[in-house]
Image: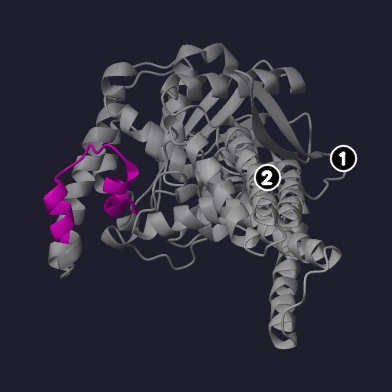
């Protein structure tokens, strides 16, 4: 009878963490993305761990509870796609994805489950009068659990710290959100004069965020504009807006951008919004400006995309030649073996992405941003610790959407705009991209158009050399044409 009762208790102890894992996999499939969901996840996990430990009366619950929870989560999200939820991948991106995906999720759920199970089992054993272990083993166990509890306390405090932005006397400085197709998209709004023109900043990759970069390098724009920096769907402030991989399309991105634009027009009473898009953000940005010119006062494309397939193939050839020329045999062999793009996922694109700064290096003396790009800008108060941890969530969005954009070619699809169009590139942009841009720009028809090339800058010219970029855009705020003298 005692053995049977013990078996029943063990089975009952297994049910709560398994059920919690199934629910969490449905509720937060890519991990908690807000302060609220993070604190709830920690609290529920701690309670479930306590219950599992209490029911089992065994410290084996410290292992069983986290394992069962993880199995439940993985079963529910088995149909998702993206580096942070796929099987672990042995590469630089793979390590980053593992840490920012399962690593962060584990700190917010597995750690409290383990700590709760340890305390629950200890309390139950004392209540039941189970004979304690030897003093050395007992104190070592208590010390280890106490250390884990201290780590959990630090994690909880970190998860509870919200993002904040410094007030602007007489101006506007706040976070905002927009609902698009039932999903919430996050914005940062800052400007010294709420009546100034509104400038909407669209970051590059799907799931991307440039809040930190804009705050570090483009704060001067707040003197002339109400600067609105948008986190695209699945970005840190738009974490819950990650669409199903099977359904995520470019049209969704354009729809989101238009929803944000219409919200800003209504909120600030403006007929038209100035649109600033960078890199991959120029794809939905240009399409939105083409389809709804009545919403925009001007379009500014930085590192404008023209044709991903041709640009990537040119970059592939240049990178492969650089690898061979500089003796990077392993990289050259890998690239030659997989052949030129397009590729089906981010793993195959990783050699191009991670070696771009080396293959197209230039003198960055005096640059505002180094070769680490947006990663080097994290740590601003406008991103909470949890949001900072999710900055690399763009890997999932990139993996899902980028391969679906390979047929895009603006030389064919966008030959005319009905809004003024201004473009900015660094003089050290990847050459293949510049060649495509020059070809497209020559045929583009627009009421006004201009192309600024910034010396000493590359693909992220607006952040690398912010002074000439801000001066260029400041002419908008002064009511003059940036292309003028």
Q: Which residues are magenta?
A: 332-353
Q: Position of residue 239 (x, y in %)?
A: 60, 38
Is residue 193 positioned above or below 295 on the image?
A: below
Do labels 1 and 2 touch, CB within 8 Å? no
The 10 Å Cα crowd at callout 2, few under 14, some 14 to 19, many 20 or more, is some
Q: Residue at x 41, y 39 (%)?
A: 398
**Image quadrant in which you'd find residue 22:** top right
Q: Which residue is mark 1?
A: 170
Image coordinates of residue 168 in percent, x first then y, are: 82, 45
**Across the whole image, how many numbered discs are drawn on residues?**
2
Q: Which of the pair 340/19 is nearer the observer? A: 19
Residue 39 on image: x %, y %: 76, 48
Determine the main secondary structure of the stretch shown in magenta: helix
- Residue at the spot 57% in from the left edge and 57% down from the top edge: 377
Tell me, yes or no, whether the highlighted magenta stretch contains residue 79.
no
Seen as rendered, the residue at the extreme front is 1
- Work out how far the residue at label 1 is from the one at label 2, CA to CA, in angstroms: 60 Å
Residue at 28 percent across and 27 percent down: it is 440
SS of the residue at dot 2? helix
Q: Quarter of the image holding residue 287?
A: top left
Residue 336 belongs to magenta span: yes
Q: Which element carries disc 1, helix, strand or loop? A: loop
N-terminal of the pair, mark 1 or mark 2, is 2
Q: Horizontal and vertical percent for residue 468? A: 52, 50
Residue 383 visible (yes or no): no
Closer to the camera, 483 or 421? Answer: 421
Q: Is residue 20 left or right of residue 193?
A: left
The residue beneath circle 2 is 12
The circle drawn on residue 409 is none
């Amino acid at each position: 009878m005692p053995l049977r009762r013990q078996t029943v208790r063990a089975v009952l102890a297994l049910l709560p963490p398994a059920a919690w894992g199934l629910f969490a996999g449905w509720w937060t499939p890519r991990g908690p993305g807000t302060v609220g969901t993070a604190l709830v996840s920690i609290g529920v996990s701690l309670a479930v761990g306590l219950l599992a430990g209490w029911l089992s009366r065994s410290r084996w619950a410290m292992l069983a509870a986290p394992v069962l929870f993880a199995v439940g989560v993985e079963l529910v999200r088995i149909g998702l796609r993206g580096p942070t939820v796929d099987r672990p991948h042995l590469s630089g991106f793979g390590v980053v994805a593992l840490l920012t995906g399962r690593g962060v999720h584990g700190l917010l759920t597995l750690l409290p489950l383990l700590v709760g199970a340890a305390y629950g089992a200890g309390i139950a054993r004392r209540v039941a009068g189970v004979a304690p272990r030897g003093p050395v083993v007992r104190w070592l166990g208590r010390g280890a659990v106490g250390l884990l509890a201290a780590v959990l306390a630090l994690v909880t405090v970190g998860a509870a710290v919200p993002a904040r932005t410094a007030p602007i006397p007489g101006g506007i400085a706040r976070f905002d959100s927009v609902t698009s197709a039932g999903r919430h998209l996050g914005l940062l709004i800052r400007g010294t004069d709420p009546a100034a023109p509104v400038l909407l900043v669209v970051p590059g990759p799907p799931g991307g965020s440039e809040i930190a970069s804009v705050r570090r390098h483009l704060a001067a724009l707040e003197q002339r504009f109400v600067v609105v920096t948008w986190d695209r769907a699945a970005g840190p402030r738009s974490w819950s807006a990650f669409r199903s991989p099977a359904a995520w399309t470019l049209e969704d991105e354009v729809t989101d951008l238009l929803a944000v634009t219409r919200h800003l027009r209504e909120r600030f009473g403006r007929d038209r919004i100035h649109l600033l898009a960078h890199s991959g953000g120029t794809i939905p940005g240009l399409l939105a400006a083409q389809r709804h010119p009545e919403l925009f006062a001007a379009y500014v494309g930085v590192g404008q995309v023209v044709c991903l397939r041709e640009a990537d193939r040119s970059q592939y050839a240049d990178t492969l030649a650089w690898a061979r020329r500089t003796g990077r045999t392993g990289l050259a062999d890998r690239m030659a073996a997989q052949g030129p793009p397009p590729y089906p996922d981010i793993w195959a694109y990783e050699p191009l992405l991670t070696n771009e700064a080396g293959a197209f290096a230039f003198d960055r003396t005096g640059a505002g941003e180094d070769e680490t790009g947006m990663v080097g800008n994290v740590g601003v108060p406008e991103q909470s610790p949890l949001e900072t941890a999710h900055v690399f969530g763009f890997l999932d969005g990139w993996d899902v959407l980028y391969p679906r954009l390979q047929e895009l070619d603006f030389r064919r699809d966008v030959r005319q705009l009905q809004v003024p169009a201004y473009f900015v590139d660094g003089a050290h942009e990847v050459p293949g991209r510049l060649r495509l841009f020059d070809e497209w720009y020559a045929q583009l028809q627009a009421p006004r158009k201009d192309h600024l090339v910034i010396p000493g800058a590359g693909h992220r010219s607006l952040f690398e050399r912010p002074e000439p970029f801000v001066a260029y855009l400041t002419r908008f705020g002064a009511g003059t044409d940036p292309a003028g003298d």
